[in-house]
Image (spheres, rainbow, N blue to C red):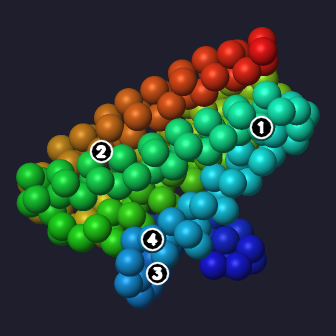
Amino acid sequence: MDFKKLVIRIKNLFLRPKSEWLVIEEEPVYESQEIIRDYALPLIFATVFWELVVVGIRLKMVYFAIVNFTLLMLALFLTISLVYDLSTRFQSYADRNAAAKLVAYCSTPLWLAQLVQADVEWLFLMKPIGFGLAAYLYHTGVPILMKPSESRRAAYTTTILLIVLTINALVWLLLDGARRFFANL
């Protein structure tokens, strides 16, 4: 996915997510790694790189950037695996590609919130706002991509949101600790 398509996808997810999920559903994806390589990786890299530029490129902050990148990728893969593994429990469509699409695109507000907050520390409200937007994207995307039964839709979406909140809160706490550790070296 080139930069222009990436920006259009983000804009459409934020401005008209329901119609964008229908477009995403129809896109051919042969392996979940395509979504990660073409969409998630550039956004995660931009987040990490921007934070590195903001704090200044020093060796100890390069170490922090490596930890940041690793934790964000780990959170992405863990969330995709859990969404996929829980799909059958909630009478949902068990498709790893659909789970990868859902998690990668719904994580966009979380990554952008971290990117914006890196510049101005007092913008700590960006992460809750990012989670709120991600929650709305999950709410609109789960029925389209994962297709849970009507009776299990709310429970599946709520479970996914709790997983996302837990994993990302843990990542943010670890990143805060790593930032402080590497800043004091």
Of all residues shown, which one is farthest toward the top? 184
Q: Distance between the residues labelled 1 and 4?
A: 26 Å
Q: Please provide percent x and percent y for residue 26.
A: 39, 85
Task: Report the side of 108 relative to 31 (left or right).
Answer: right
Task: Report the side of 126 relative to 94 (left or right).
Answer: right
Q: Dots 2 and 1: beta carbons under 8 Å?
A: no
Report the residue marked by disc 2: 160
- The mark closer to the camera, 3 or 2, is 2
- The mark closer to the camera, 1 or 4, is 1
- The mark closer to the camera, 2 or 1, is 1
- The mark closer to the camera, 1 or 3, is 1
- Residue 39's tag is none
Which residue is at a point 67% across and 71% down the rendered structure image?
6
Q: Residue 127 lies in what quarter of the image?
A: top right
Q: Residue 150 lies in what quarter of the image?
A: bottom left
Which residue is at a point 79% across and 31% down the rendered structure image?
61
Q: How far apart are marks 2 and 4 (CA)?
A: 21 Å
Q: Please provide percent x and percent y for residue 42.
A: 66, 62
Amino acid type shown at disc 2: Ile
Point out the tag, 3 or 2, that comes first from the N-terminus.
3
Q: Is residue 140 visible?
A: no
Which residue is at a point 68% across and 16% down the rendered structure image?
181
